[in-house]
Amino acid sequence: MITVTEKAKKKVDDILAEEQKQGHGLRVAVHGGGCSGFTYDLNFTEGAGPGDEIIDCGTFKVFVDPISSQYLEGSSLDFLDGLHGTGFKITNPNAKGTCGCGSSFSV
């Protein structure tokens, strides 16, 4: 399903501690919208929803709903911290194209 890099795991752990949300998990979702048709959504949640795929990352879990999972199969979640930007980055082999700003994708 989704691979989470060590840098992304560390950053999620840091944010969970900073926001005092220990015990929460990370929801990764795909929603319709944006210039190219779909956008990614990352947020914290207290638990899994019906039919969610669950990826155990050790100190937290990643939850992906059944509809989003079909678009995220084989993807990886990384955290970048450099001169060209800071933030989470999803590398999705299913994306056929992205918009100019890189915030949406098409399949």
Image (cartoon, rainbow, N blue to C red):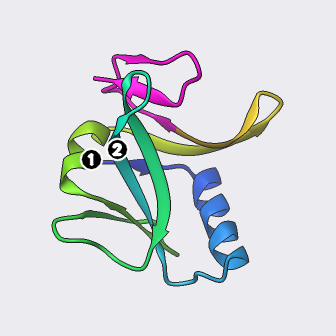
Q: Position of residue 50 (x, y in %)?
A: 18, 71
Residue 68, label in figure: 1
**Numbered label attached to residue 30:** 2
Q: Position of residue 8 (x, y in %)?
A: 60, 53
Q: Amino acid at mark 2?
A: Val
At which x and y percent is residue 78? 57, 44
The residue stretch that appears in magenta: 90-107
Residue type of the residue flagged with mark 1: Ser
Label 2: how many residues lie within 10 Å, few (<14), some (14-19) or many (20+)?
Answer: many
Q: Are marks 1 and 2 in contact (CB under 8 Å)?
A: yes
Which SS class for mark 2?
strand
Residue 37 higher or lower than 30, as above or below: above
Q: Nearer the viewer, residue 107 or 94?
A: 107
Q: In the picture provided, is 9 more to the left or to the right than 97?
A: right
Residue farthest toward the right in the current orientation of the protein: 83
Residue at 42% in and 48% down:
3
Between disc 1 and disc 2, whose residue precedes?
2
Q: How many marks?
A: 2
**Distance of mark 1 from mark 2, alpha carbons?**
5 Å
Residue 106 is a magenta residue: yes
